[in-house]
Amino acid sequence: MPIAGELCESTFGWTAVYHIFGSVSIFFFILFCLFFRDSPNEHFLTTELERRLIGDGKKQIFEADKNSGNVPYLRMLTDIVVWGILISNLGATFGNQIFNQLGPQYLSKALGMHPKNAGFAAALPFLLAAAIKIMAGPISDKIGERLSERTRVILFTSISQYFMALLFTALVLLPKDQTIAIQACYTAVAAFSGLWQIGAVKCAQLSIRQFSASIFSWNTFVSYAIVLVLPEVSSRLAPNKTAEEWNRIFIGIAVSQVICTTFFNFTARVEPRPWTMDEDISEERINKNNLNEITSS
Protein backbone atom coordinates (compact mmCIF):
# COMPACT_ATOMS: atom_id res chain seq x y z
CA MET A 1 0.00 0.00 0.00
CA PRO A 2 2.74 2.56 0.76
CA ILE A 3 4.44 1.77 -2.57
CA ALA A 4 1.15 2.14 -4.42
CA GLY A 5 0.53 5.48 -2.72
CA GLU A 6 3.93 6.77 -3.79
CA LEU A 7 3.59 5.57 -7.37
CA CYS A 8 0.08 6.85 -7.98
CA GLU A 9 1.19 10.37 -7.01
CA SER A 10 4.34 10.21 -9.14
CA THR A 11 4.68 10.89 -12.85
CA PHE A 12 4.39 7.14 -13.50
CA GLY A 13 0.79 6.98 -12.26
CA TRP A 14 -1.37 3.97 -11.44
CA THR A 15 -0.16 2.01 -14.47
CA ALA A 16 3.25 1.70 -12.83
CA VAL A 17 1.62 -0.09 -9.87
CA TYR A 18 0.17 -2.74 -12.18
CA HIS A 19 3.38 -3.13 -14.19
CA ILE A 20 5.68 -3.40 -11.17
CA PHE A 21 3.58 -5.78 -9.11
CA GLY A 22 2.72 -7.80 -12.20
CA SER A 23 6.41 -8.16 -13.02
CA VAL A 24 7.20 -9.20 -9.44
CA SER A 25 4.44 -11.83 -9.61
CA ILE A 26 5.84 -13.22 -12.87
CA PHE A 27 9.35 -13.33 -11.38
CA PHE A 28 8.25 -15.37 -8.37
CA PHE A 29 6.12 -17.62 -10.56
CA ILE A 30 9.21 -18.43 -12.64
CA LEU A 31 11.15 -19.18 -9.44
CA PHE A 32 8.37 -21.50 -8.36
CA CYS A 33 8.50 -23.38 -11.67
CA LEU A 34 12.27 -23.75 -11.39
CA PHE A 35 12.25 -25.14 -7.86
CA PHE A 36 8.99 -27.08 -7.65
CA ARG A 37 9.01 -30.87 -7.98
CA ASP A 38 6.15 -33.34 -7.59
CA SER A 39 8.15 -35.52 -5.23
CA PRO A 40 10.96 -34.81 -2.73
CA ASN A 41 12.84 -37.70 -4.32
CA GLU A 42 13.10 -35.70 -7.54
CA HIS A 43 14.26 -32.44 -5.94
CA PHE A 44 17.91 -31.58 -6.36
CA LEU A 45 18.15 -29.76 -3.02
CA THR A 46 16.79 -32.44 -0.67
CA THR A 47 19.19 -34.73 1.16
CA GLU A 48 18.63 -38.41 1.90
CA LEU A 49 17.77 -37.62 5.53
CA GLU A 50 15.21 -35.02 4.47
CA ARG A 51 13.61 -37.46 2.03
CA ARG A 52 13.31 -40.05 4.78
CA LEU A 53 11.77 -37.58 7.24
CA ILE A 54 9.28 -36.32 4.66
CA GLY A 55 8.32 -39.88 3.75
CA ASP A 56 7.71 -40.82 7.39
CA GLY A 57 5.59 -37.71 7.88
CA LYS A 58 3.47 -38.49 4.82
CA LYS A 59 2.86 -42.01 6.12
CA GLN A 60 1.59 -40.64 9.44
CA ILE A 61 -0.72 -38.19 7.68
CA PHE A 62 -2.04 -40.95 5.43
CA GLU A 63 -2.77 -43.19 8.41
CA ALA A 64 -4.50 -40.35 10.26
CA ASP A 65 -6.70 -39.59 7.24
CA LYS A 66 -7.53 -43.29 6.85
CA ASN A 67 -8.60 -43.58 10.49
CA SER A 68 -10.58 -40.34 10.62
CA GLY A 69 -13.58 -41.73 8.72
CA ASN A 70 -16.07 -39.81 6.61
CA VAL A 71 -16.90 -36.23 7.50
CA PRO A 72 -20.29 -36.18 9.31
CA TYR A 73 -21.65 -33.11 7.53
CA LEU A 74 -25.24 -33.54 8.73
CA ARG A 75 -24.23 -33.84 12.38
CA MET A 76 -21.90 -30.87 12.02
CA LEU A 77 -24.61 -28.69 10.51
CA THR A 78 -27.02 -29.58 13.31
CA ASP A 79 -24.50 -28.75 16.06
CA ILE A 80 -24.94 -25.36 17.72
CA VAL A 81 -21.20 -25.15 18.47
CA VAL A 82 -20.40 -25.32 14.76
CA TRP A 83 -22.91 -22.58 14.01
CA GLY A 84 -21.42 -20.44 16.75
CA ILE A 85 -17.99 -20.66 15.11
CA LEU A 86 -19.40 -19.95 11.64
CA ILE A 87 -21.41 -16.94 12.82
CA SER A 88 -18.43 -15.59 14.75
CA ASN A 89 -16.36 -15.82 11.57
CA LEU A 90 -19.06 -13.90 9.70
CA GLY A 91 -18.93 -10.91 12.04
CA ALA A 92 -15.15 -11.00 12.36
CA THR A 93 -14.60 -11.07 8.60
CA PHE A 94 -16.84 -8.07 7.98
CA GLY A 95 -14.95 -6.12 10.64
CA ASN A 96 -11.55 -7.10 9.29
CA GLN A 97 -12.20 -6.85 5.56
CA ILE A 98 -13.80 -3.40 5.56
CA PHE A 99 -10.44 -1.74 6.12
CA ASN A 100 -8.41 -4.46 4.41
CA GLN A 101 -10.22 -3.77 1.13
CA LEU A 102 -11.62 -0.27 1.46
CA GLY A 103 -9.40 1.35 4.09
CA PRO A 104 -7.47 3.56 1.64
CA GLN A 105 -10.78 4.83 0.21
CA TYR A 106 -11.98 5.82 3.66
CA LEU A 107 -8.73 7.57 4.55
CA SER A 108 -8.36 9.47 1.29
CA LYS A 109 -11.97 10.30 0.37
CA ALA A 110 -13.81 10.50 3.69
CA LEU A 111 -10.98 12.01 5.74
CA GLY A 112 -9.19 13.83 2.94
CA MET A 113 -5.84 12.22 3.65
CA HIS A 114 -3.18 12.54 0.95
CA PRO A 115 -2.79 9.28 -1.05
CA LYS A 116 0.87 8.95 -0.08
CA ASN A 117 0.01 9.12 3.61
CA ALA A 118 -3.12 7.00 3.16
CA GLY A 119 -1.08 4.12 1.73
CA PHE A 120 1.18 3.90 4.77
CA ALA A 121 -1.68 4.54 7.20
CA ALA A 122 -3.66 1.68 5.64
CA ALA A 123 -0.73 -0.77 5.84
CA LEU A 124 0.42 -0.03 9.41
CA PRO A 125 -2.56 -1.65 11.21
CA PHE A 126 -1.99 -5.01 9.54
CA LEU A 127 1.66 -5.04 10.54
CA LEU A 128 0.55 -4.53 14.13
CA ALA A 129 -2.10 -7.25 13.74
CA ALA A 130 0.58 -9.72 12.62
CA ALA A 131 2.72 -8.85 15.65
CA ILE A 132 -0.23 -9.27 18.02
CA LYS A 133 -1.05 -12.69 16.55
CA ILE A 134 2.51 -13.81 17.26
CA MET A 135 2.43 -12.54 20.85
CA ALA A 136 -1.12 -13.63 21.71
CA GLY A 137 -0.41 -17.37 21.53
CA PRO A 138 2.26 -17.41 24.26
CA ILE A 139 0.15 -15.01 26.35
CA SER A 140 -2.80 -17.40 26.11
CA ASP A 141 -0.59 -20.27 27.27
CA LYS A 142 0.75 -18.22 30.18
CA ILE A 143 -2.70 -17.46 31.60
CA GLY A 144 -3.83 -21.05 31.02
CA GLU A 145 -2.96 -22.03 34.59
CA ARG A 146 -5.50 -19.57 36.00
CA LEU A 147 -8.32 -19.76 33.46
CA SER A 148 -10.10 -22.70 31.90
CA GLU A 149 -9.74 -23.41 28.18
CA ARG A 150 -13.31 -22.31 27.45
CA THR A 151 -12.83 -19.08 29.40
CA ARG A 152 -9.72 -18.27 27.40
CA VAL A 153 -11.48 -18.94 24.10
CA ILE A 154 -14.36 -16.64 25.05
CA LEU A 155 -12.02 -14.03 26.54
CA PHE A 156 -9.86 -13.58 23.44
CA THR A 157 -12.84 -13.62 21.09
CA SER A 158 -14.65 -11.04 23.22
CA ILE A 159 -11.63 -8.76 23.54
CA SER A 160 -11.14 -8.87 19.79
CA GLN A 161 -14.71 -8.35 18.61
CA TYR A 162 -16.25 -6.19 21.35
CA PHE A 163 -13.30 -3.80 21.27
CA MET A 164 -13.54 -3.63 17.49
CA ALA A 165 -17.24 -2.76 17.84
CA LEU A 166 -16.34 0.01 20.30
CA LEU A 167 -13.69 1.34 17.93
CA PHE A 168 -16.11 1.41 15.00
CA THR A 169 -18.55 3.30 17.23
CA ALA A 170 -15.79 5.75 18.15
CA LEU A 171 -15.10 6.34 14.44
CA VAL A 172 -18.76 7.33 14.09
CA LEU A 173 -18.77 9.68 17.08
CA LEU A 174 -15.38 11.36 16.70
CA PRO A 175 -15.29 14.73 14.89
CA LYS A 176 -13.63 14.34 11.51
CA ASP A 177 -11.02 16.97 12.34
CA GLN A 178 -9.64 14.71 15.09
CA THR A 179 -7.38 12.94 12.63
CA ILE A 180 -4.94 11.56 15.22
CA ALA A 181 -7.71 9.95 17.28
CA ILE A 182 -9.35 8.57 14.13
CA GLN A 183 -6.04 7.15 12.93
CA ALA A 184 -5.52 5.52 16.34
CA CYS A 185 -8.97 3.89 16.20
CA TYR A 186 -8.40 2.81 12.61
CA THR A 187 -5.09 1.19 13.53
CA ALA A 188 -6.51 -0.47 16.65
CA VAL A 189 -9.35 -2.09 14.67
CA ALA A 190 -6.94 -4.21 12.63
CA ALA A 191 -4.72 -4.84 15.65
CA PHE A 192 -7.58 -6.25 17.74
CA SER A 193 -8.80 -8.37 14.83
CA GLY A 194 -5.69 -10.51 15.20
CA LEU A 195 -6.89 -11.83 18.57
CA TRP A 196 -9.97 -13.48 17.06
CA GLN A 197 -8.00 -16.48 15.84
CA ILE A 198 -6.73 -17.19 19.36
CA GLY A 199 -10.37 -17.55 20.40
CA ALA A 200 -12.78 -18.88 17.79
CA VAL A 201 -10.21 -20.74 15.69
CA LYS A 202 -8.83 -22.48 18.76
CA CYS A 203 -12.38 -23.39 19.77
CA ALA A 204 -12.83 -25.12 16.40
CA GLN A 205 -9.57 -27.04 16.77
CA LEU A 206 -10.43 -28.26 20.26
CA SER A 207 -14.09 -29.15 19.77
CA ILE A 208 -14.17 -30.37 16.17
CA ARG A 209 -10.75 -32.01 16.24
CA GLN A 210 -10.03 -34.14 13.17
CA PHE A 211 -12.87 -32.51 11.20
CA SER A 212 -11.80 -28.92 11.87
CA ALA A 213 -10.43 -28.65 8.32
CA SER A 214 -14.00 -28.79 7.05
CA ILE A 215 -15.18 -25.85 9.10
CA PHE A 216 -12.07 -23.89 8.17
CA SER A 217 -12.91 -24.44 4.51
CA TRP A 218 -16.45 -23.19 5.17
CA ASN A 219 -15.06 -20.14 6.93
CA THR A 220 -12.78 -19.51 3.96
CA PHE A 221 -15.73 -19.73 1.57
CA VAL A 222 -17.69 -17.23 3.68
CA SER A 223 -14.68 -14.90 3.79
CA TYR A 224 -14.29 -14.97 0.01
CA ALA A 225 -18.01 -14.33 -0.42
CA ILE A 226 -17.71 -11.28 1.84
CA VAL A 227 -14.73 -10.06 -0.19
CA LEU A 228 -16.94 -10.14 -3.30
CA VAL A 229 -20.02 -8.63 -1.64
CA LEU A 230 -18.38 -5.90 0.43
CA PRO A 231 -17.57 -3.45 -2.42
CA GLU A 232 -21.19 -3.63 -3.61
CA VAL A 233 -22.51 -3.05 -0.09
CA SER A 234 -20.11 -0.14 0.32
CA SER A 235 -21.15 1.46 -2.97
CA ARG A 236 -24.82 1.28 -1.98
CA LEU A 237 -24.46 2.52 1.59
CA ALA A 238 -21.75 5.09 0.81
CA PRO A 239 -22.10 6.03 -2.88
CA ASN A 240 -20.30 9.36 -2.41
CA LYS A 241 -17.75 8.01 0.11
CA THR A 242 -18.45 10.83 2.57
CA ALA A 243 -17.75 10.46 6.28
CA GLU A 244 -21.47 10.53 7.09
CA GLU A 245 -22.13 7.69 4.66
CA TRP A 246 -19.26 5.65 6.06
CA ASN A 247 -20.87 5.98 9.50
CA ARG A 248 -23.74 3.78 8.31
CA ILE A 249 -21.29 1.03 7.42
CA PHE A 250 -19.46 1.32 10.74
CA ILE A 251 -22.68 1.15 12.77
CA GLY A 252 -23.84 -1.91 10.85
CA ILE A 253 -20.52 -3.69 11.38
CA ALA A 254 -20.41 -2.81 15.09
CA VAL A 255 -23.93 -4.17 15.67
CA SER A 256 -23.20 -7.36 13.71
CA GLN A 257 -20.00 -7.98 15.66
CA VAL A 258 -21.77 -7.65 19.01
CA ILE A 259 -24.56 -10.02 17.93
CA CYS A 260 -22.23 -12.60 16.36
CA THR A 261 -19.78 -12.59 19.27
CA THR A 262 -22.50 -12.85 21.91
CA PHE A 263 -23.97 -15.85 20.09
CA PHE A 264 -20.53 -17.46 19.94
CA ASN A 265 -19.89 -16.88 23.65
CA PHE A 266 -23.09 -18.70 24.60
CA THR A 267 -22.43 -21.64 22.29
CA ALA A 268 -18.65 -22.05 22.56
CA ARG A 269 -17.40 -25.40 23.86
CA VAL A 270 -13.89 -26.83 23.95
CA GLU A 271 -14.70 -30.47 24.70
CA PRO A 272 -14.68 -32.81 21.68
CA ARG A 273 -18.12 -33.01 20.11
CA PRO A 274 -19.85 -36.42 20.37
CA TRP A 275 -19.74 -36.98 16.61
CA THR A 276 -15.94 -36.72 16.67
CA MET A 277 -15.89 -39.80 18.91
CA ASP A 278 -18.12 -42.23 16.98
CA GLU A 279 -17.37 -45.84 16.24
CA ASP A 280 -14.94 -45.01 13.44
CA ILE A 281 -12.70 -42.98 15.70
CA SER A 282 -13.59 -43.75 19.27
CA GLU A 283 -11.58 -42.79 22.32
CA GLU A 284 -10.62 -46.43 22.82
CA ARG A 285 -9.16 -46.61 19.31
CA ILE A 286 -7.25 -43.36 19.75
CA ASN A 287 -5.72 -44.57 23.03
CA LYS A 288 -4.82 -47.89 21.42
CA ASN A 289 -3.06 -46.15 18.53
CA ASN A 290 -1.18 -43.89 20.94
CA LEU A 291 -0.13 -46.93 23.00
CA ASN A 292 1.15 -48.71 19.89
CA GLU A 293 3.18 -45.64 18.92
CA ILE A 294 4.71 -45.43 22.40
CA THR A 295 5.62 -49.13 22.58
CA SER A 296 7.07 -49.15 19.07
CA SER A 297 9.27 -46.11 19.79
Image (cartoon, helix red, strand yellow):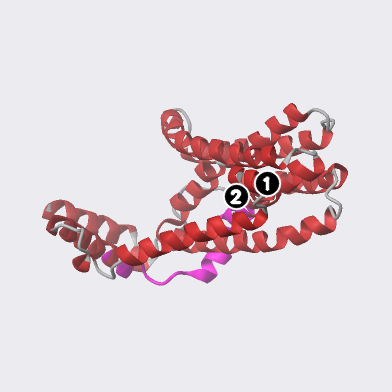
* The quadrant where residue 44 appears: bottom left
Mark 2 residue element: helix
Tell me if 46 is positioned left or right of 7 in this view: left
Is residue 83 visible to us here? no
Q: Amino acid at mark 2?
A: Thr
Residue carrying label 2: 267
Tell me if 201 is positioned left or right of 168 in this view: left
Q: Main secondary structure of the magenta part?
A: helix
Q: Position of residue 4 (x, y in %)?
A: 62, 48
Query: At 58% across and 64% down in the image, what residue appears?
Result: 221
Q: Position of residue 202 (x, y in %)?
A: 48, 47
Q: Are marks 1 and 2 in contact (CB under 8 Å)?
A: no
Looking at the image, is 74 positioned above or below residue 290? below
* Residue 72 part of the magenta segment: yes
Q: Position of residue 162 (x, y in %)?
A: 67, 38
Q: Amino acid at mark 1?
A: Phe
Magenta region, residue range:
63-89
Dot 1, how many residues are within 10 Å of its Cα: few (below 14), some (14-19), or many (20+)?
many
Q: What's the mark number on residue 99? A: 1
